[in-house]
Structure formats: structure tokens, C-alpha cells
Amino acid sequence: MKTLYLIRHGESEGNAQRIYQTPDAPLSPKGKEQARILKERFKHIPIEALYCSTLKRAQETAEIINQVFNLPIQATPLVNEWGKPTSLLGKEVEGEEAKEFHTALRSRSRDPYWKWQDEESIGEVRDRTDKFLKEMKRISQQNILVVMHSLPMKMMLSIVLYGPEHIPFVQGSSPFPVYISNTGITVFQLPEGKDHWELVTFNDHAHLGEA
């Protein structure tokens, strides 16, 4: 049975400041500690392949966890965070321009490829995350760890639960109202002889000792 462990990166400086992040946003001190705690949790899991997004906060998280495995880290933009409008980068998530962006998205929910400015459309996020899940079916390794981001992980959850044709209503920056903790673990499995991933675990963050 193939198992896919999806990890949200540790807390970044941008998460702590509640701003839209640039690709080079690093982990915060708390985020580095979260990654070190998560590393201990994976000591006895036989991971055979390690993927991460091309964004710095995910790569730093992967590097810390990889101290256990010493595997090649395979960076891929297929699991990058949703690319936000350039005009929002560095600005507050709850700011007025952000509210205007999300209001516009909600008004165009039936057009998944609509764009407000130069951002990545929600349909494009769906397409690339679906491509990644299909690629994971084809690789030979059975236990795969992926360090990624909240929105693409939620999109993968939507694909697994409802199918790749389904694009959920965009409420804020999330396809549905669920929260994924920094270093939270979501697990999909692909049973032998089956073609569809199954959800086993969602947002397990017991290692952080938080409610």
C-alpha cells in the first residue's frame, strides 16, 4: 500500500506577522522548533522519497526533517502555495485590499480560472495539485513525505473526497472552512489494486501538544 504524508511547513515569519508572503519568507524561530519536533515523530517511519515546494519556508522545514532520512529533497512547484496577487505581497491578510480581493473571488466562484490581477487562479491550483497526486501514483516508492502549504493541501483533500472535477467555493483563501496547523500531518493511502487515494488522517498535530 502506498502512503502519502502531507506536511504543512512550520510557522513562517509571514504567518506570525499575518501578511501575504513572498517566496523567500523564512521560518520563524517557532517554526524551526516545530520542524525539529516533527523530525522526532518521523524517526521510525520508513520514508523513501521526500518532496517539497520551491518556497523557502517549505524547504527549510524539509531540510530539518531530512536530518532523519538523508534523502534527496525533490523540489516541485506543483505543491507551492497559491500564488497571490503581487500587489498584496507584504500586506496584511486582513487588510482592505485583501478583503477586496476575496470579495471579488467569491463573486466569480463559478469561473475557477478568473483572475483579479496577476495571481494564480483557483482552477490552476486544482490542476497542478491533481497532477501531483497522479504523479505520486506512478512513482515506485511506497512511503512518501511532502512538505507543502495549506491551500494546495486543502485542494488535494477536495480532490480525494469529491474528485478532480470539483472546485469548491472560494471562501477567503480556503476551498472549505478547515484549518491546517503548521507541521500538521495529513495522510492519504492508495490501497493495492485501487486507483483512488483514501483519506486516513487529517491535520494531526498531536506532536505539538496543542488542543
Image (tube, helix red, strand yellow):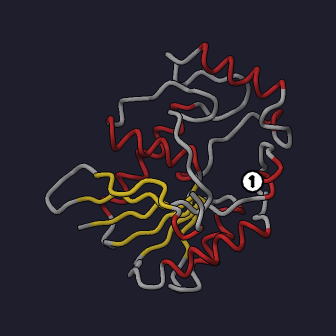
Residue under the point 38% across and 57% down: 201
Q: Position of residue 138 (x, y in %)?
A: 30, 61
Between residues 50 and 28, which one lies in front from this camera angle? 28
Identify the residue under disc 1.
23
In the picture as drawn, the residue positioned furthest to the left comes out as 193
**Amino acid type, label 1:** Pro
Q: In the displayed structure, does residue 132 sit left or right of residue 141? A: right
The tally of labels here is 1
| Viewport quadrant of the N terminus | bottom left
Q: Position of residue 157 (x, y in %)?
A: 41, 44
Q: In the displayed structure, does residue 56 sit left or right of residue 107? A: right
Q: In the displayed structure, does residue 188 sit left or right of residue 7? A: left
Quarter of the image where one finds residue 189: bottom left
Residue under the point 81% across and 44% down: 19
| Viewport quadrant of the C terminus | bottom right
Question: Is 153 drawn above or below residue 182 in the view shown?
Answer: above
Q: Position of residue 11 (x, y in %)?
A: 71, 60
Q: In the displayed structure, does residue 204 sit left or right of residue 140? A: right
Between residues 151 and 178, which one lies in front from this camera angle? 178
Residue under the point 52% across and 40% down: 178
The 10 Å Cα crowd at callout 1, few under 14, some 14 to 19, many 20 or more, is some
Quarter of the image where one finds residue 34: bottom right
Question: Is 68 drawn above or below residue 194 in the view shown?
Answer: below
Q: Position of residue 198 (x, y in %)?
A: 28, 52
Residue under the point 62% across and 48% down: 81
Quarter of the image where one finds residue 75: bottom right
**Local SS, label 1:** loop
